[in-house]
Image (spheres, grey):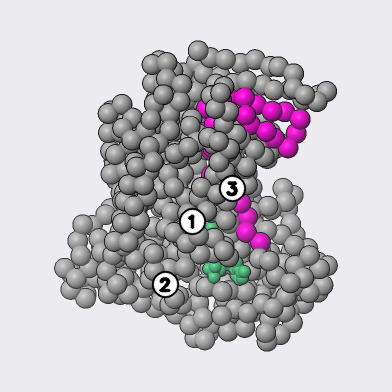
């Protein structure tokens, strides 16, 4: 039965509010989760630290921020009239447009009235007697809920290098994931950008176009494929909209959650000329399609190296200075075992007179100084430093909240050696806690939109089942969780992914347990497993 009531807490203005569910985060997951719970007649409150909806698209508003999943598949698949009324302007959606879309959906379904902004969740603890979660915030409000749903995102907590003197810099500093809402004008300024991941690769060309001087500090080069972005072709849009259900169904059961032409063919089944032709064809298509030219690119070292060398040659052809080109060529990891980047004019930016590339592998940064950055080789005086240094991914947002399960067990302690989940949805000892696109699910290795929808729908169906059957709590069995963690690792170990020092393994955060977190077994395979678990009465979970 739906419950929503307020009771007065201990301090004069503290109020405890009771709901069936508290959803943490108002990004794409939180918005859809709220909508589904409303449909079930459950009461829910979304708690969000930002001032508006958007999640990652609210925080990451740096110049050039754009999704590298194509617009037509970076939209909710429901309902039909929503799809018809929304039109994206370009092939890949820009940050402000995605935020506009999420805002539009929020208004369209009148979701805002169940959302509370500028409210950061600090603690969530399971009360074993009441069988409810107590959710504390940085404000006076405390919430009590049967279900606690973490829609906190995978790429949420910014990573700032802990360099000597990092607070001593007297110029402007920015982290791309905390970009100001007002325009930042770099005209006439000398700017340093640290980091060349997906974010840096998008921001660098935009900053270079405005700044007087740009110095890019690169530790590890990444592979990037051109986006060939442009206005969305209305004929393409019509075709997708007219066949939306068919395409979405294909995406849901595909390996990636995206609509790519995937060739189930080894690279070595083609002659060298055929391979070259296929690579060129995929290069001309742009974006992630390149990854699916052959089925063994991510499993066979030799096949992978051939693709890697093709992309390195493209870098060499795009960059005028051969020495700079070589510095930009990745060699420390197999192709696409760190997140593949998608760019617009990234490599060409290094042909500009106002751009300099510094290789931190040769000359590491030693300190931040009041006037800039000093490496082992030189001092760089700049007006502004942009940290495009990524995130404490997958677990960072969850660990920022003091999450306590049965007997006060801390999630952070339970997961000290790496996250342990069953299906990436729940973890033993933490009843009625759900993690949308949590570690151990396809999440960041798939189209986030497909994976978000799948998790939200699975959780909503589960809550409906529990409510109708009068079940108080659900949590994974330890053995099911252990088997799943082992399976996730086994599947990852059958690929080249674990060879890279990537954020997928936590290697980007000093001291973080190194374990490959996303499930690479495929979106369709994973969906089938989740559906079977539900059909078998939530096999692997304890329902009490
Ligand atoms: P990232 O991929 O983790 O890249 C961070 C960059 O900062 C790396 O080049 C890293 O070097 C560098 N760095 C970090 N700490 C450093 C240090 N102490 N010294 C020197 N360099 C340091 O982070 P991101 O670029 O923000 O992207 C994160 C993820 O967000 C992406 O992989 C993607 O999934 C998502 N994203 C998506 C889009 C999109 O279009 N959909 C756009 C942007 C981001 P190392 O590699 O050597 O660690």
Callout 1–callout 2 Cβ contact below 8 Å: no
- The image position of residue 339, as x and y in percent, is 45, 61
Image side of residue 470 versus residue 141, left or right: left
- Residue position for label 2: 333
Image side of residue 261 versus residue 65, left or right: left
- Residue position for label 1: 417
C-alpha separation, residue under disc 3 versus residue under disc 1: 13 Å
Q: Is mark 2 within 8 Å of ligand 1?
A: no
Instruction: Kindly tell me whether residue 425 is visible in this rendering.
Output: yes
- Residue position for label 3: 399
Give the residue drawn at x 52%, y 73%: 220
Q: Which residues are magenta?
A: 132-160
Describe the element under mark 2 as helix, strand or loop. Answer: loop
Q: Splitting the image into 4 quarters, where does residue 337 fall?
A: bottom left
Look at the image and tell me in which quarter the C terminus lies: top left
Give the residue drawn at x 51%, y 81%: 327
Image side of residue 7 versus residue 360, left or right: right
Report if residue 145 lies within the magenta region.
yes
Report if residue 413 lies within the magenta region.
no
Give the residue drawn at x 61%, y 35%: 124
Mark 1 or mark 2: name the one nearer the start of the chain. Answer: 2
Front one among 244 and 176: 176
Q: Nearer the viewer, mark 3 or mark 1?
A: 1
Q: Residues within 10 Å of mark 1 (few under 14, many from 20)?
A: few
Q: Is residue 296 above or below residue 323?
A: above
C-alpha separation, residue under disc 2 versus residue under disc 3: 28 Å
Mark 2 or mark 3: name the one nearer the start of the chain. Answer: 2
C-alpha separation, residue under disc 1 versus residue under disc 2: 24 Å
- The image position of residue 429, as x and y in percent, is 48, 37
Give the residue drawn at x 71%, y 59%: 174
């Amino acid at each position: 039965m739906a419950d929503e009531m307020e009771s007065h807490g201990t301090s004069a203005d503290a109020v405890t509010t009771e709901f069936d569910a508290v959803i943490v985060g108002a990004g794409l997951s939180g918005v859809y989760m709220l909508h589904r719970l409303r449909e079930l007649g459950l009461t829910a409150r979304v708690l969000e630290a930002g001032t508006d909806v958007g999640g990652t698209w609210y925080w990451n508003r740096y110049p050039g921020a754009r999704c590298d999943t194509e617009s037509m598949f970076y939209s909710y698949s429901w309902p039909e009239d929503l799809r018809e009324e929304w039109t994206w302007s370009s092939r890949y959606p820009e940050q402000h447009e995605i935020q506009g879309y999420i805002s539009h959906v929020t208004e369209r379904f009148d979701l805002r009235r169940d959302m509370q902004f500028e409210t950061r969740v600090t603690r969530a603890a399971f009360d074993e007697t009441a069988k409810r979660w107590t959710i504390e915030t940085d404000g006076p409000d405390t919430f009590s809920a049967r279900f606690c749903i973490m829609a906190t995102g995978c790429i949420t907590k910014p990573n700032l290098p802990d360099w000597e003197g990092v607070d001593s810099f007297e110029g402007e500093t920015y982290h791309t994931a905390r970009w100001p809402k007002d325009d930042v004008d770099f005209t006439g300024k000398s700017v340093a950008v640290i980091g060349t991941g997906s974010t840096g690769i998008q921001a660098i060309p935009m900053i270079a176009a405005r700044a007087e001087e740009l110095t890019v500090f690169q530790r590890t080069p990444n592979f990037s494929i051109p986006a060939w972005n442009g206005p969305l072709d209305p004929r393409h849009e019509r075709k997708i909209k007219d066949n939306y259900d068919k395409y979405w169904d294909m995406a849901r059961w595909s390996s990636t959650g995206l609509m790519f032409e995937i060739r189930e063919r080894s690279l070595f089944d083609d002659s060298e000329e055929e391979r070259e032709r296929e690579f060129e064809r995929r290069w001309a298509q742009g974006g992630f399609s390149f990854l699916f030219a052959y089925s063994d690119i991510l499993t066979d070292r030799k096949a992978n190296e051939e693709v890697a060398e093709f992309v390195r040659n493209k870098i060499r052809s795009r960059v005028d200075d051969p020495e700079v080109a070589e510095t930009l060529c990745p060699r420390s990891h197999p192709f696409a075992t760190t997140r593949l980047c998608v760019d617009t004019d990234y490599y060409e930016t290094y042909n500009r007179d106002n751009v300099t590339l510094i290789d931190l592998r040769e000359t590491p940064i030693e300190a931040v100084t009041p006037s800039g950055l000093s490496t082992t080789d030189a001092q760089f005086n700049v007006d502004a430093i942009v940290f495009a240094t990524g995130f404490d991914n997958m677990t960072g947002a969850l660990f920022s909240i003091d999450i306590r399960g049965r007997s006060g067990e801390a999630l952070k302690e339970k997961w000290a050696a790496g996250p342990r989940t069953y299906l990436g949805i729940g973890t033993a000892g933490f009843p009625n806690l759900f993690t949308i696109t949590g570690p151990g699910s396809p999440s960041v290795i798939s189209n986030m939109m497909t994976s978000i929808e799948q998790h939200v729908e699975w959780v909503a169906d589960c809550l409906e089942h529990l409510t109708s059957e009068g079940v108080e709590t659900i949590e994974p069995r330890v053995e099911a969780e252990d088997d799943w963690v082992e399976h996730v690792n086994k599947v990852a170990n059958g690929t080249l992914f674990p060879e890279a020092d990537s954020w997928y393994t936590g290697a980007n955060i000093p001291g973080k347990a190194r374990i490959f977190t996303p499930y690479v077994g495929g979106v369709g395979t994973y969906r089938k497993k989740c559906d079977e678990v539900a059909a078998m009465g939530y096999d692997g979970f304890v329902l009490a």
